[in-house]
Amino acid sequence: MNILVIEDDKYFRAQIIQNIGQGQNRHTVYEASNITFAENIINTKRIDLAFVDLNLSDNKEQFEGIHLIQLLKENMIPAIALTSHNSEQVIKECFLAGAKAYFVKDNFIDNFQSLTREFLSSTEELNLDSFFKSKFVTGNKDLINNITNFIKVAKNSESRVLITGPTGVGKTEVAKLIAQTSDNTKIPFVHINLNELSENLIESELFGHKKGSFTGATEDKVGLFAKANNGILFIDEIGSISLKIQKKLLTVLETKQFSKVGSTDIESSNFRLISATCDNLEELILRNEFRLDLYYRLKGLHLDIPSLNKRPEDIQLLIEHFLSQSTKKLFLDDQAKELLNDYSWPGNVRELKSLVDELINCSTGMVTKSDLPTWISDRYCSSDLFSNHNELYDYATTHGLNHLVEKIQKTILKRTIEEEGNKVNSVVKKLGISKSVFYRLTSEDRA
């Protein structure tokens, strides 16, 4: 951990630092004696925890530390307030500013370990700095804070978890993080993406099957319910399953019991379910495509991850991260950066990574507008979006924007189906949609 000690009394500061170091040699300690030094460290260093003296000047009624606690909160750094003051008003202002704990200096050093052991331990366990720099790269403070708080609750709970958000935003990485931060990291973690399987294969994968139960079942198969016993089962894109499978899944969640396909023998499995989807399950419920009772069973703890176009500050950060992983170095000129920043990224982080990989493989080094795909480079060739799209504009103003969007969706879907040879999995992957969306659009077209 990187710990910051803000204290103007050099002797008291030295004692705090000494106590932090006892048996904790892996900690790095930064120290500041005034508000200027403290602000500089907060703004330039990665800090995991800060001890803050409230009074940093000769004026004993001036509490500069409260401002620093607010700054620490803005940077999502937990702060412990230290002071000689014990007034109710000061305590109130500290906690309103964002302090996680408040200690009076009297006898603090003598009781340092007992007072801070639990807090230091819980803070260290939730140090997700490496996760946000390698697995789920983001500089969005609200998102970092939401995920951190969510993991804190999820790791201390056995509740089911539902993670929602557009395809490609990193739902799987968050699910894996929950398993990695659990009290027992050696428990099974079983993952299935339902978008990759047909309905009959979904049932076989989840429940298992007996030899001869259907064509191709040449031997007994152990299903994922059984494999996840006493562990975690992560079902990705759960919104794409049929009502038939939904009913069976609901029964398993209620009873913890199931039977293999082609068998009447009852088996039991005690697993924790984490599910994820890019679909709006509430809309599916209104269309009678998803069971309300199953939805409430899934939605124990809920985390929604926003799309990349809602956190544009992450685009360049992600590009730099993906480029740093390659031995081949590229440079993007200003126009290319601007085009990438303005693009909507419907495939989110996954689409961005795929583009960067393509640029690494194909570009000679300097990336310009001409190196980008046409759907990105031509997207904002004019300040007037409709300057070269008068037909689209006329259609929208005549028939309505919703009708235009539906027409575009169906046209693109039809072309992609033809290009992919009617392979549903290939189509949904290429368009970045779920199977439920695919079947809804194709059924509307047939209607």
Image: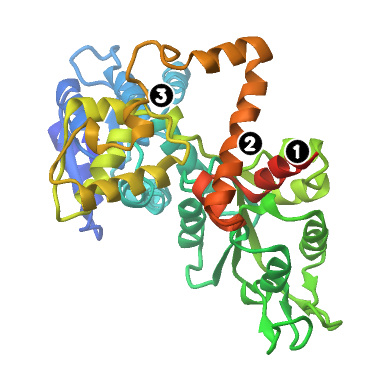
At 66% from the left edge and 72% from the top edge, which residue is drawn?
205
Q: Nearer the viewer, residue 151 or 253?
A: 253
Is 71 placed left or right of 56 in the picture?
right
Q: Nearer the viewer, residue 430 or 192?
A: 430
Q: Are marks 2 and 3 in contact (CB under 8 Å)?
A: no
Q: Which residue is mark 1?
A: 444
User: Looking at numbered disc 3 in the image, what kind of residue is underneath it?
Assistant: Asn
Dot 1 falls on a residue whose secondary structure is: helix
At 23% from the left edge and 38% from the top edge, which residue is drawn?
371
User: Looking at numbered disc 1 in the image, what kind of residue is underneath it?
Assistant: Glu
At 54% from the left edge and 13% from the top edge, which residue is drawn?
393
Q: Which residue is mark 2?
A: 410
User: Looking at numbered disc 2 in the image, what kind of residue is underneath it?
Assistant: Lys
Badge 2 density bin: few <14, some 14–19, many ≥20, Cα 10 Å: some
Residue 84 in sight = yes
Q: Which residue is mark 3?
A: 86
Q: Nearer the viewer, residue 308 or 35?
A: 308
